[in-house]
Amino acid sequence: MFFSSNIFSRYFKQFDWTAILDDAVSKLISLLFLFILFYIAKKLLHVFVRRIISPSLKFSSTDIARQKTISRLIENVLNYALYFLLIYWILSILGLPVSSLLAGAGIAGVAIGMGAQGFLSDLVNGFFILLERQLDVGDSVRLTNGPINIAGTVVSVGIRTTQIRDADGSLHYIPNRNIMVVSNLSRGDMRVLIDIPINAQTDLDNIARVIEKVNQASLKDYPEILQEPDILGPQLEDNSQFVFRVSMMVQSGTQTKIYHSFYRLYHEALLKEGIDLPN
C-alpha cells in the first residue's frame, strides 16, 4: 500500500502544476477574447452588408428580388469564412497543429474525413440554382423531391441551404442537394382556376349568367386581373364531383387573394339567386 502511494506521489510531483494552471487560465482568457472579437466581427459584418453592400446593389440593373438574393448570398459566404477563422483560431489556441494537419492530410482529405461530401453537393447545386436564377428572395415557389413537397416564400438563398417560409409561418431549411424540382410561381402572369361545386341537375346557363354578372360588377375593383375571366363551364373532377370552372389571368403573387375573393363572390351570388349548391 505504501509502495503504491509512493508511485502515485512521484508521478504527480513530476508535473509543474503552477505552469499547467497558468497555461489553462491563459487559454481560457484567449478564448474569451476570441469569442468577444468574433461577436463584434459578426455584428460589423451584418452592418457592412446592410449599410454598404445592399445600397450599392441598388445602382445595378438587377431587380429588387435579385438584389436581396445577392445581398443574402454575400452575407452567407462571409459568415462561413468567419466561422472557419473562428474554428481555426480555437484549435490554434488549444495547441492543436492545424497547419500540420492540413499539410499532412490535404485539405480535400480533411474535408472528406469530416463527412463534407454532402456539403460539397450542396455548394455545387446551390451554385447552379443561383447561376440559372431559378429562384430569388421573395419569390413564391414550390420545391419538390419525390414525395416531399414544400411551398412558400423564399426567405434566403445560400450556397448550402435555401430557406422557405411556409403559409403557416414555419421556416424550412432545405439543403440545396435535396432540391430536385423548382416550381417558381412568381415568374410571369399566373392562371387562377376557380371551381364551384354544382349539382348535376343545375341549370348551367343560369350559373353562367350569374357569374358573368359578378364579373361585370367586380372586375373594376381588382386591377390585378389582367384580362376578362374565361368562363369554361362544367367540369368533372376525379372524385366524380361536377364543378363549374372559371379561369383568370392575374399578376404573380396575387393568385391566392383573387381565388378566395371571387370564390366568395360567386358563391354568395349563386345562393342569392336561389341556385342550390352541394354541401
Image (spheres, grey):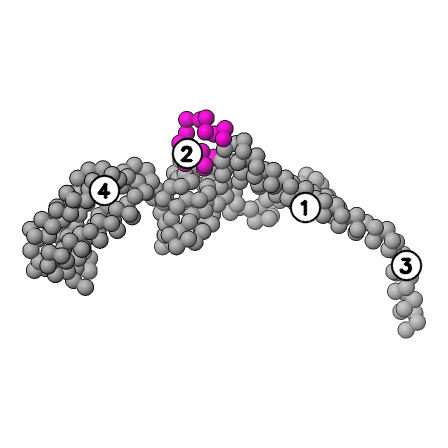
Identify the residue shown where x is 26% and y is 51%: 260
Report the mark closest to the observer, 2 or 3. Answer: 2
User: Residue 186 appears in which quarter of the rendering?
Assistant: top left
Q: Which mark is residue 221?
A: 4
Badge 1 marks a residue whose secondary structure is: helix
Question: Which badge, 3 or 4, comes first in the chain's sequence?
Answer: 3
Q: Which residues are magenta?
A: 55-70
Q: Amino acid at mark 4?
A: Asp
Instruction: Work out whether mark 2 precedes mark 3 in sequence or the reverse, and give the earlier one.
Output: 3
Badge 1 amino acid: Phe
Residue positioned 47% across, 50% down in the render = 173
Residue type (three-letter) at the residue carrying disc 2: Ile
Residue identifier under label 2: 64
Specify whether residue 63 is painted magenta: yes
Q: Give the left or right position of residue 227, taking residue 25 as reference.
A: left
Q: Earlier in the sequence, mark 2 or mark 4?
A: 2
